[in-house]
Structure formats: C-alpha cells, structure tokens
Image: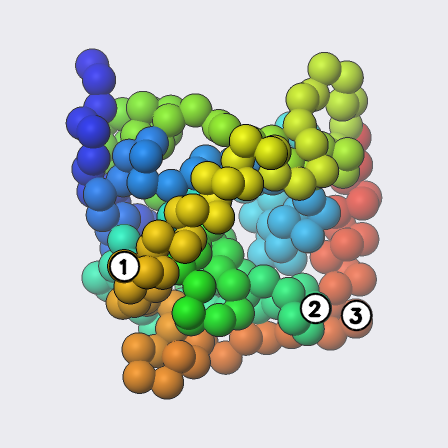
Amino acid sequence: MLAPMAQDIPLRCTCGSLQGVARGMSPTAGNRALCYCKSCQAFAFFLGRADEVLDEHGGSDIFQTTPSRIQITEGADQLRCMQLNDGGLYRWYTECCQTPVGNTMSSAQIPFIGLLSTIMDHDATGHSRDEDLGPIRDRVWASTARGDRTGLSGSDGFSYASLPRLFWMMLSNRIRGLHQPSPFFDVASGNPRATPHVLTVAELKEAETRRDATER
C-alpha cells in the first residue's frame, strides 16, 4: 500500500516520556541522508545508544526538514542539548532515556533540523521509513564509515546534486518564516530551550574512545 503524499508521523522517545508529531511529512518535505561522520558516531556513543542509532557502518539515518513541522506534545521538559565542541551543532536528546532527537544549527534563524530515525515512530503510520520519507538520497562522510567499506558508495560532504536542493530548502523555508515556531528555540529571545552542554575534554575523549574501540 502506498503511503499518503503527506502525513503526520508520531515522535516518541524510547520510554515514552517525550512525545510529539512531525507534521506534513513526505519525501518532498525534506532530505533523507545517511551520515557516517565521526561526530554523529561520537554523539551516539556519548548517549550509550550506538546499537540503536548506527547501522553496521556507523551511519545515522537523518531526515533534514524545518523545525516548524515539529511539535512536542508531551515531555518537552525532557529535551536536552549538547555540543561535541564549542561552535558545533546543537545535538538534541532526551534526559529521561537518552534518546537522540536531532541536530540543529546554533542559530534559531536557520530553518533546519536533522531528525534521527530513533525518534520517529513509523510503526504507528503503518508504513516503512522508505514509504514515509522516501529512499536515502545522500550517503555522506563515507571515508569515516566503520568496518569494511568495500562497495560502500558515498562522498565526503553532500553531493553536487543535493547541495542546491538543501540550499533552496533552507532559503525558501526562511523566506516563508518556517524557522518558527520551533520546539528547540524560544520565539521571543531566540535562545535554545535547553542550555547547551559543551563536552569537556574528558567527556569527548571518552565518547571517542568508545567509538574507536568498536571499530570493525
């Protein structure tokens, strides 16, 4: 059965304390990418959720869309924010069960959220992730993928075909004011709704050590 052109997809952390909805989701509502970068891998290991988040090559399945599509209906107080280093992406997760939620830029003015597959409840839609969001369009930072990379396609960065699409998506969404409302930033001040925790040198080293110890 074909999925509707656009539909609402429930959001739910592992323990169910945080719930919400991603509205109007479809393959044309954003860009689906598989990221193999070591930062995304370190984030998963920092949370202790690598087995659920990462595929066999260390890839994170991310759907890049606008924050205005995201609504938290329960447990917004469980949202937490961290940065692997000062100036890095804001990486959002839940305090209750350490479920990765997604990545945003550090500015509320940029209409971008990369939702992790772990927060999207595709079972509730009755469709697969491929049916709900379309196939993976980009496989990026393939040179830092884990394990045997023979036959693994991808690039170090987004493809020339994807860059114009991503740029236009963010530009058009910003012109239409779709950076707000956002569950991640306060509308009035533009400040993140949770104070970003920048990992200490020791915390970052621990996450990287866990990541590198499982290299296959």
| Disc with the residue nearer the chain's start (1 vs 2) | 2
| Disc with the residue nearer the chain's start (2 vs 3) | 2
Measuring from the top left, give residue 38's x and y in whole percent: 72, 47
Query: Dot 2 surroundings within 10 Å: few (below 14), some, or many (20 or more)?
Result: some
- State the image quarter where residue 55 is shown: top right
Amino acid on which disc 2 is placed: Asn
Distance from Cα at disc 1 to Cα at disc 3: 42 Å
State the residue position of label 1.
176
Seen from the viewer's position, the closer of residues 23 and 209 is: 23
- Viewport quadrant of the C terminus: top right
Query: Dot 1 surroundings within 10 Å: few (below 14), some, or many (20 or more)?
Result: few
Distance from Cα at disc 1 to Cα at disc 2: 31 Å
Q: Is residue 28 above or below residue 72?
A: above
Measuring from the top left, give residue 195's x and y in whole percent: 50, 79
Seen from the viewer's position, the closer of residues 105 and 46 is: 105
Disc 2 versus disc 3: nearer the observer: 2
As helix, strand or loop, the secondary structure at mark 3 comes to: helix
CB of mark 1 within 8 Å of CB of mark 3? no
CB of mark 1 within 8 Å of CB of mark 2? no
Query: Dot 3 surroundings within 10 Å: few (below 14), some, or many (20 or more)?
Result: few
Say which residue appears at 27% left-offset and 48% top-offset: 22
Amino acid on which disc 3 is placed: Ala
Disc 1 versus disc 3: nearer the observer: 1
Distance from Cα at disc 2 to Cα at disc 3: 12 Å
Res 85 label: 2
As helix, strand or loop, the secondary structure at mark 2 comes to: loop
Q: Is residue 133 above or below residue 49?
A: above
Using the rendered image of the protein, determine whether residue 99 is visible from the camera's viewpoint.
no
State the residue position of label 3.
202
